[in-house]
Amino acid sequence: MTLPNILILAAGASSRMGARDKLTEQVAGQPLLTRGCERALATGAPVTVVLPPDHPARHMTLTGLPLRIVIVQNAVEGMAASLRAGLASLPDHSPGVMILPADMPDLTTDDLRLMLDHFARDPSRIWRGASADGQAGHPALFPAEFYPDLMAVQGDEGGRSVLMSHQNRVALVPLPGTNAVLDLDTPEDWAAWHAQHSGGQ
C-alpha cells in the first residue's frame, strides 16, 4: 500500500516569540524544523513542507533533505491557506495525508509510524494523535476522500472543522506522555521545555 503523505505546516508567523523564530530554535543541536522533518522522513512516507516566502532561515534548515517544499504566498491568511497549498501539491494517487504542525518537539518517528500503522489497518478512519491520558491532539491523518473538505477550510485553522464535522469517523491514537499535545509558542514555553529536558536533549 502506498504510504500517506506527511504534510508539515511551517508557514506560521511565530508572532508570540517576539524577534525569535520558534521553528529555527535549537533542539538537541539542530533547528526544530529540521528535527521534525527528519523524524517524518524516517518513517519512509513522502514529506511536504509548506513555508512562507519571507523566512529564508527556515528554507536553509531544510537544505539537502529529500522532501517537497511548497511556498504559500498568502500565509498571512492563516493555517488554512497553508493547508490548501500543501494539499494542492500532493499527487493524485496519495491515499491520505497526515497533517503535522511544525512546532511540536516531542513527537517521534515511532509516534508517526504508529499513526501510519493504524491507517494501514483501517484507511477509512480519520486517525488523530492523543496524549497518553486521552486528550486529542496532533497529528491528524485523513483519508483522501476528505481532501475536498480540507480544501474548503478557511481562516486560521487546520483540519479542526473537518474533525468536528466527522466525529463519527475519528479514532484516537494514544501517544506517549504529552507528545501529541505539547507545542512551543512563546519564549517562556521554550525555557520551560529546555529546563525539563536538561538542555534540549
Image (cartoon, rainbow, N blue to C red):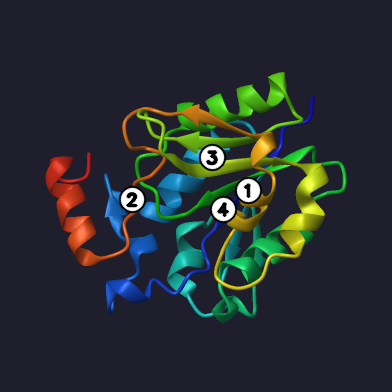
Q: Amino acid at mark 4?
A: Ile
Q: Amino acid at mark 2?
A: Gln
Q: Residue at x 42, y 40 (%)?
A: 180
Residue 30 disc label? 2
Sequence-first disc among 3 and 1: 3
Q: CA distance from mark 4 to mark 1?
A: 18 Å
Residue 10, how many percent across, how many down? 51, 62
Mark 4, residues whose alpha carbon is within 10 Å: few (<14), some, or many (≥20)?
A: many
Q: Are marks 4 and 1 in contact (CB under 8 Å)?
A: no
Q: Vertical placement of 68 versus 22: above or below?
A: above
62 sits left or right of 83 in the view: left
Q: Say which of marks 2 and 1 sits in front.
A: 1
Residue 111, how many percent across, how many down? 47, 30
Residue 141, how many percent across, how many down? 64, 40
Q: Say which of marks 2 and 3 sits in front.
A: 3
Q: Residue at x 67, y 53 (%)?
A: 162
Q: Say which of marks 3 and 1 sits in front.
A: 1
Q: CA distance from mark 3 to mark 1?
A: 22 Å
Q: Secondary structure at mark 4?
A: strand
Q: Amino acid at mark 3?
A: Ala
41 sits left or right of 81 in the view: left
Residue under circle 3?
40
Residue 181 disc label? none
Residue under circle 4?
8
Q: Are marks 4 and 3 in contact (CB under 8 Å)?
A: yes
Q: Secondary structure at mark 2?
A: strand
Residue under circle 1?
163
